[in-house]
């Protein structure tokens, strides 16, 4: 099969959370254990760091990758979802895995796919483990998909775990209270293994302290940093704090140089090939895109946008199961709003988004797709104003694809 045919096979054959939502989320580890047994358990050959959290886990993963790359280590990194190319999920020193590897791996495991019918995510996790083991990485940075306890990544035996933040998201799968959600995230804490805790509230801290104590896991609380970095946003200092606390905890296993680490923080995006986090797409007018998609993420977005004196125009799109009642109150009522449907089956129709926003006395215009909204907004916006695009990973994916195909007015 070609690379495109291989991806089509994976997308069509396997339940995929991005398309199907909670139905594709399997609340047990049976399939991933069978897959990895079939591959002779590549995850057991890896030295790894495991990262969970409502927000910040992707940023923290990329920060750690940049730090260890700059210090001369061969670094594997598994994150999800991808934005433009499937191979973004599996990187070696910031470079996506090869198309040939994806093709050959899929051919190799077809028999077990046909036998156990795993989810798309389970396949990608096993693929990452196999790739990192074959490449003999010095450290594999593994980001959870959803939760932690029953996440497919949770069969590794890491040398450290990180829980970046706790907030309300994916409540249909993780629970309706902070205690329940925290318990799910805390599932990545392993016996006698250090766990770094990022910015969490008192309730979450109590749960995490209890679980860490039960597992005799050394508990390290992040220190907010004030480091110079190419990453934009105050919240990135929290993620840098988590990453540096982890690096410090592992200094005897993975020694680093402070000068090289500081240099890495200035070049996280380039070193780790980091996309979609407060990414500036155009400067005049300023066009910013961000993948933040839950209450906690939007509070961070609103905080950053409040630092601008420019008039702000929002172009937003969401997935169909997103609870907008938590998100809308974080947004400024005086801004202008355009609503679009992400280019996926699970995308919420723009008319439905507009109606929900109107119930909060926020008026807006609905568009069939992102391209239409951007084209229309660009006709009226002045050069000293700001356009923010977001609401979902998939909206940023649409934006990146439009940019790549030169279908935007900038």
Image (cartoon, rainbow, N blue to C red):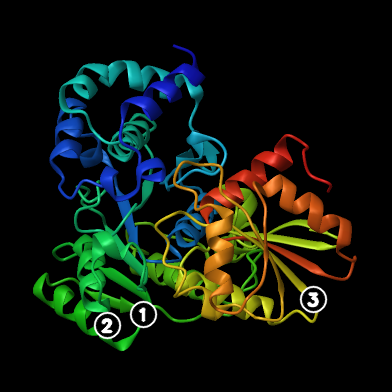
Residue at horizontal 12 percent and vertical 72 percent from the top: 216
Q: Which labelled disc corresponds to residue 200?
A: 1
- Work out whether 211 lies above or below 108: below
Which residue in the structure is indicated by mark 2?
205
Q: Which labelled disc corresponds to residue 269?
A: none
Mark 1, secondary structure of its residue:
loop
Q: Measure the C-alpha gap from mark 3 to mark 1.
A: 32 Å
Residue at horizontal 67 percent and vertical 52 percent from the top: 367
Q: Going by the picture, which residue comes out furthest to the bottom?
A: 202
- Would residue 275 be visible to someone looking at this image? no
Q: For the N terminus, give its image quadrant.
A: top left
225 with respect to 388 (left or right): left
| Residue 34, position as x, y percentages in the image | 14, 32
The mark nearer the N terminus, 1 or 2, is 1
204 or 75: which is nearer to us? 204
Q: Going by the picture, which residue comes out furthest to the top?
A: 1
- Would residue 173 be visible to someone looking at this image? yes
Which of the 4 quarters of the picture holds residue 279?
Answer: bottom right
Which of the 4 quarters of the picture holds residue 109?
Answer: top left
Q: Nearer the viewer, mark 3 or mark 2?
A: 3
Mark 3, secondary structure of its residue:
loop
Task: For label 1, count other residues whose C-alpha is less than 10 Å away and answer few (under 14), some (14-19) or many (20+).
Answer: some
Residue at horizontal 85 percent and vertical 62 percent from the top: 285
Q: Measure the C-alpha gap from mark 3 to mark 2.
A: 38 Å
222 or 378: which is nearer to us? 378
348 with respect to 269 (left or right): left
Which of the 4 quarters of the picture holds residue 160?
Answer: bottom left
Please say if the residues under marks 1 and 2 sit with CB atoms less than 8 Å apart. yes
- Work out whether 343 lies above or below 216: above
Q: Going by the picture, which residue comes out furthest to the right?
A: 383
- Work out whether 282 lies above or below 119: below
Residue at horizontal 24 percent and vertical 46 percent from the top: 152
């Amino acid at each position: 099969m070609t690379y495109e045919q291989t991806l089509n096979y994976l997308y069509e054959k396997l339940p995929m959370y991005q398309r199907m939502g909670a139905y594709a989320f399997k609340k047990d580890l049976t399939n991933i254990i069978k897959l990895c047994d079939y591959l002779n358990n590549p995850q057991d050959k890896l030295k790894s760091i495991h990262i969970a959290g409502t927000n910040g886990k992707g940023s923290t993963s990329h920060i750690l990758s940049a730090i260890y790359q700059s210090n001369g280590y061969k670094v594997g990194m598994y994150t999800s979802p991808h934005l433009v190319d499937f191979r973004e999920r599996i990187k070696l020193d910031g470079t996506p895995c090869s198309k040939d590897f994806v093709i050959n791996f899929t051919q190799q495991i077809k028999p077990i796919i046909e036998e156990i019918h795993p989810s798309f995510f389970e396949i990608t996790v096993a693929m990452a483990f196999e790739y990192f083991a074959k490449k003999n990485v010095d450290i594999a940075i593994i980001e959870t998909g959803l939760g932690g306890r029953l996440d497919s990544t949770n069969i590794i035996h890491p040398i450290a775990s990180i829980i970046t933040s706790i907030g309300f998201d994916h409540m249909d799968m993780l629970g309706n209270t902070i205690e329940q959600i925290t318990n799910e995230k805390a599932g990545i804490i392993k016996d006698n293994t250090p766990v770094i805790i990022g910015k969490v509230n008192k309730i979450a801290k109590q749960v995490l302290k209890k679980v860490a104590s039960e597992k005799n896991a050394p508990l390290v609380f992040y220190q907010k940093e004030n480091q110079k970095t190419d990453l934009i946003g105050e919240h990135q200092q929290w993620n840098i704090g988590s990453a540096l606390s982890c690096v410090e905890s592992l200094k005897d296993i993975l020694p680093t140089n402070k000068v090289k680490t500081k240099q890495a923080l200035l070049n996280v995006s380039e070193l780790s090939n980091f996309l979609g986090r407060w990414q500036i797409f155009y400067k005049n007018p300023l066009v910013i895109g961000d993948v933040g998609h839950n209450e906690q993420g939007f509070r961070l977005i609103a905080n950053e946008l409040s630092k601008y004196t420019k008039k702000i125009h929002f172009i937003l799109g969401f997935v169909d199961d997103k609870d907008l009642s938590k998100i809308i109150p974080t947004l400024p009522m005086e801004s202008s709003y355009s609503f679009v449907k992400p280019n996926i089956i699970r995308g919420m129709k723009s008319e439905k988004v507009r109606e929900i926003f109107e119930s909060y006395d926020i008026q807006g215009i609905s568009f069939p797709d992102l391209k239409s909204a951007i084209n229309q907004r660009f006709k009226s916006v002045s050069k000293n104003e700001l356009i923010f695009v977001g609401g979902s990973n998939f909206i940023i994916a649409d934006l990146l694809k439009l940019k790549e195909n030169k279908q935007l007015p900038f």
